[in-house]
C-alpha cells in the first residue's frame, strides 16, 4: 500500500480532469494508505474546481444487490462501489441517477443529460455509458483503482455482442422522492455455462502503448 499526500492526489485529479467533457471517477481510496476521511475535502475541492471549469463529473454509485433485493432507493440505497459518490452529494448541484444497478452521482453542466439516460439497459444505447462514450473528450479516471475494474469495458462487450454474454432482465421497485414505481433493466451478463473470466489486460496494454492512458507518479 502506497502513501500519497492528499494535496498531491487533489492536484493530480485536477490535472487529469481539466478540459474534459465528462470525467468518470472509479476509486479505491484505501490504496492510498490514509484514513480515507482525510481525503474527503481535498477530493471534493478538486471536483468542485473542475466542475467550475465546465467539466461534468460522474462517480459510480452502483447497487448490484438490486439483483437480489429488487429494491433501489435513489436517496437511501448505499453505493456498493465506494464512499466517494456519497461524498460528492455534499456538493451543491450533485444528483444521483435512477438506474437500479448502475446509478451515478453526477455534478456539472451535463447533469440533466445523465439523469435522462434510459434505465432499459445497463450498457446499451442511451445508457449513461453510451452518453460518456459519445461525448467528445470524455475521460476515465482510475483513482487508486486498477484499470481492469473500468466498467466501460462492459459497454464495448455489449456493443460488439461478445458471444460469452447474453441478455438477462431484472425487475423491481424504484423509490425516489418518496414515491415508488416498477422498474426493469436488461444487462448483458456473463454466460454461466461458459463461465468466462474477465481479463482486460491486453486492452489495457494496448491503450498504454498508444498513449491513451496517462499515469501519475506515485512517488
Image: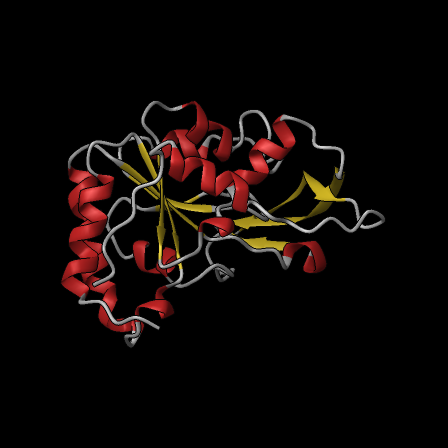
Q: Residue placed at 79% from the left, 45% from the top?
A: 191
Above/below status of 196 relative to 136: below
Q: Residue placed at 58% from the left, 39% from the top?
A: 154
Residue 150, position as x, y percentages in the image? 48, 46
- 170 relative position to 155: left or right: right
Residue 146, position as x, y percentages in the image? 44, 55
Instruction: Classify residue 212 by image quadrant.
Output: top left
- 83 relative position to 11: left or right: right
Above/below status of 81 relative to 160: below
Looking at this view, name the residue that lies furthest to the right.
193
How many tags in the picture?
A: 0
Q: Residue placed at 15% from the left, 35% from the top?
A: 53
Asked whether residue 120 appears in the rendered view, the answer is no
Instruction: Classify residue 166 by image quadrant.
Output: top right
- 125 relative position to 213: left or right: right
Quadrant containing the N terminus in the rendered view: bottom left
Above/below status of 182 relative to 157: below
Instruction: Classify residue 15 by image quadrant.
Output: top left
Looking at this view, name the residue that lies furthest to the front.
209
Quadrant containing the C terminus in the rendered view: bottom left
Q: Nearer the viewer, residue 18 or 101?
A: 18
Q: Nearer the viewer, residue 74 or 152?
A: 152
Residue 99, position as x, y percentages in the image? 55, 43
Colouring mode (rainbow / by chain / secondary structure / one colour): secondary structure
Q: Residue placed at 50% from the left, 51% from the top?
A: 149
Asked whether residue 69 appears in the rendered view, the answer is yes
Looking at this view, name the residue that lies furthest to the bottom.
35
Residue 202, position as x, y percentages in the image? 54, 41
Amino acid at each position: 500500500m502506497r502513501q500519497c499526500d492528499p494535496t498531491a492526489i487533489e492536484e493530480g485529479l485536477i490535472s487529469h480532469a481539466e478540459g474534459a467533457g465528462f470525467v468518470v471517477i472509479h476509486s479505491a481510496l484505501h490504496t492510498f494508505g490514509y484514513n480515507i476521511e482525510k481525503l474527503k475535502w481535498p477530493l471534493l475541492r478538486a471536483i468542485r474546481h473542475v466542475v467550475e471549469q465546465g467539466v461534468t463529473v460522474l462517480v459510480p454509485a452502483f447497487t448490484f444487490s438490486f439483483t437480489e433485493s429488487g429494491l433501489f432507493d435513489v436517496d437511501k440505497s448505499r453505493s456498493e462501489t465506494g464512499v466517494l459518490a456519497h461524498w460528492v452529494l455534499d456538493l451543491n448541484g450533485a444528483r444521483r441517477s435512477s438506474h437500479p444497478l448502475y446509478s451515478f452521482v453526477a455534478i456539472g453542466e451535463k447533469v440533466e443529460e445523465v439523469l435522462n439516460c434510459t434505465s432499459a439497459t445497463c450498457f446499451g444505447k442511451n445508457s449513461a455509458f453510451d452518453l460518456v462514450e459519445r461525448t467528445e473528450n470524455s475521460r476515465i479516471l482510475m483513482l487508486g483503482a486498477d484499470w481492469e475494474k473500468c466498467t466501460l469495458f462492459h459497454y464495448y462487450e455489449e456493443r460488439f455482442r461478445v458471444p460469452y454474454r447474453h441478455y438477462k432482465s431484472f425487475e423491481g421497485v424504484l423509490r425516489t422522492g418518496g414515491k415508488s414505481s416498477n422498474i426493469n433493466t436488461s444487462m448483458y451478463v456473463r454466460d454461466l455455462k461458459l463461465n468466462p473470466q474477465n481479463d482486460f489486460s491486453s486492452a489495457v496494454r494496448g491503450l498504454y502503448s498508444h498513449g491513451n492512458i496517462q499515469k501519475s507518479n506515485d512517488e
